[in-house]
Amino acid sequence: MDIIPGSNVDIVLDFDWWKEKIDVRRATVYDLNDKRMVLSQTAPPTARYNIGKKVKITYLLMEKDGWVRYGINGRLIENAMDYRLSGHQTVQAIIITPEPGREFFNLRLFYRLEPPLDCGLALFLKKEKMNILNISLGGSQFTHSKDYPIMPRNRLKLILQIDKQRYDIEAQALRVSSVSGRMGEKLEAIAVQFLNPDKKVQELLSIKIKDIERKIRYKESYAED
């Protein structure tokens, strides 16, 4: 296992695509084996109603191309009020039963960027270019004509364009909401989740989002001067 006692991890207690909700809490590993993982109590503390909940333990691992975050699935089984750490010292702890295996996990999935025009990002649905309201590694929100309504849970075949290179990507509609202003009569806002995107495409999109974010911050700092 990549995690050892003393490792710092992030515990994902809640991960809900439909509500765009993520609850991440930091902890330190005290002890672990294949059947049990003992960690420091999180801040804020996990409540008793979290006992029995499925969670994900995420951690960073240095690989050839840099830091990569992985996740291990598990179940929170106990809040220990007096776990014996060493000698007579006792601490509050949480105990998780881990599942075998790990998977790539990215906490930036929920970071949404409002891309400026002509930034090198484009999204197409049925060959028609969509107006992107925001985009992240995990999904996007764009405006769409009400003449061809999309319903929540509909599967969509999109084309994501990154600096003139196009990639097929499958998505699922999460929510449909109204658009403010005079265009509200013709358009609706569609929020989608990208489904099983190719790792290469996700890496390219991550690089592009970070590049756009850096340029936006630079312009904002330059404007303040």
Image: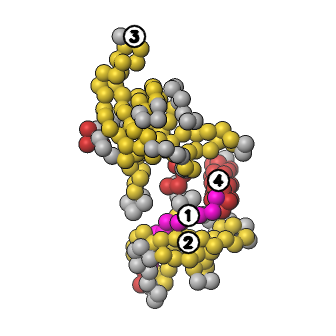
Q: Kindly report which numbered mark, 4 or 3, lies closer to the viewer in this rendering.
A: 3
- Residue where numbered disc 2 is placed: 170
Visible residue check, residue 218 = yes
**Mark drawn on residue 150:** none
Marks 2 and 1: CB-CB under 8 Å? yes
Residue 182 higher or lower than 215, as above or below: below
How many numbered dots are placed on residues in this image?
Answer: 4
- Local packing at callout 1 (Cα closer than 10 Å; few below 14, some 14-19, many 20+) is few
The residue drawn where x is 39% and y is 10% is: 87
Write the residue at 32% across / 38% down: 77
**Nearer the camera: disc 4 or disc 1:** 1
Task: Estimate the x, y position of residue 59 in percent, counting from the top left.
Answer: 54, 39
Of the pair 47 and 104, the residue shown nearer to us: 104
Tell me the amino acid under the disc marked 1: Asn
Between disc 3 and disc 2, whose residue precedes?
3
Q: Where does label 1 land, which residue?
A: 196
Q: Furthest residue to the bottom?
A: 147
Q: Disc 2 versus disc 1: distance between alpha carbons?
A: 8 Å
Q: Nearer the viewer, residue 161 or 224?
A: 161
Disc 2 or disc 4, which is closer to the eye?
A: 2
Q: Residues within 10 Å of mark 4 (few under 14, many from 20)?
A: few
Q: Which mark is residue 87?
A: 3
* Marker disc for residue 210: 4
- Under tag 4, what secondary structure? helix
- How far is the residue under mark 3 from the one under mark 2? 55 Å
Figure quadrant of residue 126: bottom right
Q: Earlier in the sequence, mark 3 or mark 1?
A: 3
Q: Position of residue 22 (x, y in %)?
A: 42, 51
- Circle 2: residue type: Glu
Quadrant of res 66:
top right
Closer to the N terminus: mark 4 or mark 3? 3
Q: Is residue 181 visible?
A: no
